[in-house]
Amino acid sequence: MIVDGFRSSLRAYCVTIEDGVVDTLLLASMDRKLCDVANHLAFCHRNYVEKRVEANSLLALMTLRRKRLAHEAVQADRMVEETLEIQDQLIALRTSVLVRLFDRIYEQMPSCLL
């Protein structure tokens, strides 16, 4: 599942940060992952909306597909929620990387510029 891949990426970023590797390459990698997460969110949300609309259609009622479509919509909604949680965690982790990078830059500045 794609969400599991996002979770493993999040864990890998945490391990990398714990190992002390905080640089612009890590930040760029996290930005790319956030873009992937956003695209996945858009896809899941569209899937959810399409399933809900189809489940509430007259055709679904007449063909007895409404229950299955409603179940698929619930699954898509769960996927949206899980992905949103991962996105929040990734944004928080990215923020901590930015803070560490700024701290490192500040520490390396000559005292005359401070």
Image (tube, helix red, strand yellow):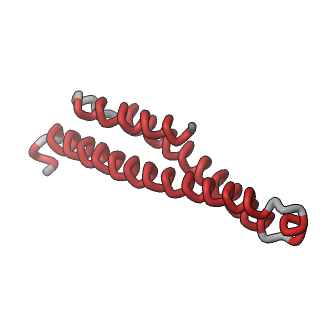
Q: Residue furthest front?
A: 64
Q: Residue furthest left?
A: 111
Q: Quadrant of the N terminus?
A: top right
> Which residue is more in the foreground, 23 or 52?
52
- Identity of the residue drawn at 72% across and 65% down: 52
> Which residue is more in the foreground, 2 or 100?
2
Residue 22: x and y in percent read 28, 34
**Left or right: 69 in relation to 25:** right
Residue 29: x and y in percent read 45, 35
In the rendered image, the vertical position of residue 18 relative to residue 89, given as above or below: above
Q: Residue 101 lies in what quarter of the image?
A: top left
Residue 41: x and y in percent read 59, 53
Q: How many marks?
A: 0
**Left or right: 63 in relation to 95:** right
- Identity of the residue drawn at 29% across and 31% down: 15
- Identity of the residue drawn at 74% across and 56% down: 68
Q: Residue 12 lies in what quarter of the image?
A: top left
In the rendered image, the vertical position of residue 60 relative to residue 40, given as above or below: below
- Identity of the residue drawn at 48% across and 39% down: 6
> Which residue is more in the foreground, 36 or 28?
36
Residue 74: x and y in percent read 62, 59
> Which residue is more in the foreground, 85 or 94?
85
**Left or right: 55 in relation to 110:** right
